[in-house]
Amino acid sequence: MPVKPVTRFVLFAAPIAIAASILFNGGDDDPEPPADAPVAAADPADSAVGPDPYAAADDGERRELDERAEAMPAGLAAPAERELAWKLLATSESSTLDWRSQYGMIDDNGDGTGYTAGIVGFCSGTHDMLTFVEAFTEDHPDSPLAPYVPALRKVDGTGSHKGLDPGFAAAWKKSAADPVFRAEQDRVREKQYFEPAVRLAKLDGLGTLGQFIYFDAMVLQGPGTEPDAFYGIRKAALAEADTADEGGDEKVYLDAFLDAARAVMKSKRNQHDTSRIDTAQRQFLYDGNLGLKPPLTWKMYGETFHVAS
């Protein structure tokens, strides 16, 4: 099986901390976007129209948006489509359709972000792994990962393994045998990435393919408003085309979104392989498969994958 090219993101501390608070109480390697990033900086003043319609909304307006989305067809959130989304993401992240095998996955891709682990690729150098492990071990102090929290704090923001080797990888894999640990990974994937992406895609008038495109971009680039994060990509797309909800052509808008997402990937030194767009998402779009209906055949990093139903 081909080794997946390095495609990790850096998530910024504030969005992660907010997400962790929600979850457990219920990006590029550089700290600044590249100078040649193709997207203009997000302006909080226009957040009501983009990049994030929830940002400037009050509680009542948020409820209204939620109710609108919930009244729409399930789309990617339907059980069979959700399973398909997990498979498609796993081919992009780990070159496999067997996404359930990824809870215990842990490796260093050599991209300077340290260990990458789990179903959404938590990284020891990009704050998201630290936030996840801190929150989990606070609720489960007997976790095999608990002794490594101080070391994770020290290596956060670096690619170092100091204090993590030789036992951290084994501790992660041991933790992944625990259904509670797996469930927490599921919850992060759902609450931090999947639900916000699918909800916003529905509000933008997008079908199941568009909902997956949003979800994949949010996982890869993080749920931030920076030019090289999800909402920055959406803002760039909105500058080029109207959403279907605004009366635009869905294919034209998604093409613009994929152009913006691809440009961000190419601007990052660790994301130059754009297979997830070029030979998967864009292919589905050009085939006119806006409903993302199987059978599906696509290529990822040169390997062919197929889902019959």
Image (cartoon, helix red, strand yellow):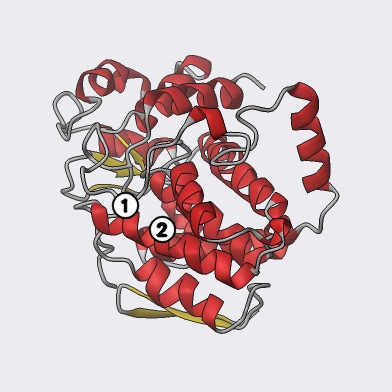
- Give yes or no for contact between labels 1 and 2 (Cβ–Cβ under 8 Å): yes
Tell me residue 112's x, y (percent).
17, 41
Label 1, label 2: how far apart the Cα atoms are: 8 Å
Label drawn at residue 38: 1
Picture coordinates of residue 305, whole percent (x, y): 45, 78
Residue 20 position within the rendered picture, expressed as x and y whole percent measured from the top left: 51, 24
Is 266 on the left or on the right of 45, as rendered?
Answer: left
Three-letter amino acid code at disc 1?
A: Pro
- Taking the image as shown, residue 238 lies to the left or right of residue 80, namely left
Q: Left of 112 or right of it: where is 307?
A: right
Give me the residue at 74% from left, 31% from top: 62
Q: Residue furthest right?
A: 71
For the point 37% across and 20% down, which residue is it? 146
| Residue 227, placed above or below residue 158 | below
Closest to the observer, 57 or 83: 57
Query: Of label 1 and label 2, which has the lower sequence position?
Result: 1
Q: Is residue 1 visible?
A: yes
Q: Is residue 103 in sight in this rendering?
A: no
What residue is pinned by disc 2? 260
